[in-house]
Image (cartoon, rainbow, N blue to C red):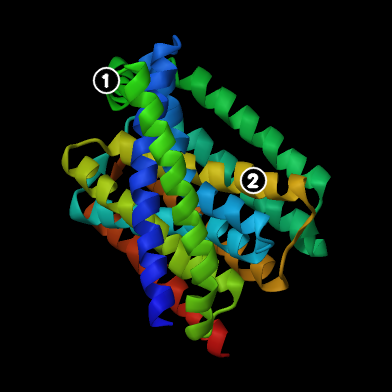
Amino acid sequence: MLEATGWFLLGLVLLALGGDSVVRGASGLAQRAGASPFVTGLLLVAFATSLPELAVNVHAIVEGRQALALGNAVGSNVVNFGLTLGVAAWLAPMTVRWRALTPLLVVLMLGTAAAIAMGLDGALSRVEGGVLLAAFAAAFAFALRRTRGENADVRAEIERYARTSTGLGQNLLRVAIAVALLYFGSRLIVEHAPVLGLGLGMTPLVTGLLPVAIGTALPELAAAIAAARRGQGDMVAGHVIGSSVFNLLLVVGGMALFRPLPLPPSFVRFELPAALAFALMLYPMLRGDQRFSKAEGGILVAALLAWIGFELLLIHA
């Protein structure tokens, strides 16, 4: 188990490095090809931070470890809200002015509720996976259209996030390095996380929900804390909500479209409702004074700790 832990941690490091490299490389190539900094920034803010989790999930699916991928996809959403947003707000209360995020949060809530309803028969079919993918495409189109009407400060903040060198050779090298790092990092995690989970008495699903989801979120947590302290609350909330929509609709939907996806009864009864509960908690915080206070951050962190405790109790029940 000690050896597996070491390889697992190395995998997390490679994923973190690969995720940062691919964001910069993709941004530079997109702008070189003619995409505006605003469109590029919107894509990167909303979805790019999920690429390490996506790499793990793709590798897990290829290796036939669907339970691990499923746990990571939904566990990452809970961790996004409770750990990334919660800790960042607790350490540095922040204001969120990006109005498109509230409708996206509603899409996330509706999508999670739909996944629960569709999973009551024990699986997501290919048709149901297609429905989730179509919802993702509609959500992204809406976000792009709605955000064009945001105030100048929000647009400028999104554009600044995308600014980087547009040199062709440099960005091709960034992407090539990122692909290699993401491949080997995800491979190490998929190979050794089940061994680590087994040593801790966890099923593959819970391994994805807890150690993998928390581990892959740590680099984003560090970035979120730094952004919150710089007063970039829109970036923090955009990362969290956008990546959660990405994980649920695109990743889970894509898994089901690729191959009918079995859903364990506990997943439909506990894990998906937990993800929905966190999104519901976030809604009044975002709709109220448009500010995540220290107390609200503390509530999210406390809820995450309660959820982790509940999952651990289920293991030993």
- Give residue 173's mark: none
Q: Residue at x 52, y 36 (%)?
A: 104
Amino acid on which disc 1 is placed: Asp
- Residue 38 visible to an observer of this rendering: yes
- Marks 1,2: beta carbons within 8 A: no
Relative to residue 160, is residue 177 depicted above or below? below
Q: Residue at x 59, y 48 (%)?
A: 248
229 left or right of 118 in image: left
In the figure, residue 298 lies in which quadrant? bottom left
Q: Which residue is mark 1?
A: 153
Q: Which residue is mark 2?
A: 111
58 left or right of 238 in image: right
- Percent across and percent down for residue 167 are 32, 17
Amino acid on which disc 2 is placed: Gly
Q: Quadrant location of the C terminus? A: bottom right
- Residue 241 visible to an observer of this rendering: no
- Percent across and percent down for residue 285 are 37, 47
**Sequence-first tag of 1 and 2:** 2
Asked which secondary structure carries label 1, the reply is helix
Relative to residue 257, is residue 31 depicted above or below? above
Q: What is the crowding at mark 2: few (fewer than 14 residues within 10 Å), some, or many (at least 20)?
A: many
Q: What is the crowding at mark 1: few (fewer than 14 residues within 10 Å), some, or many (at least 20)?
A: few
Asked which secondary structure carries label 2, the reply is helix
- Percent across and percent down for residue 289 are 31, 40
Instruction: Measure how far apart labels 1 and 2 are at the Cα level.
Output: 30 Å
Relative to residue 106, is residue 216 depicted above or below? below
- Percent across and percent down for residue 219 are 31, 52
161 left or right of 282 in image: left
Q: Kindly give the residue lying farthest to the top in the view shown.
A: 34
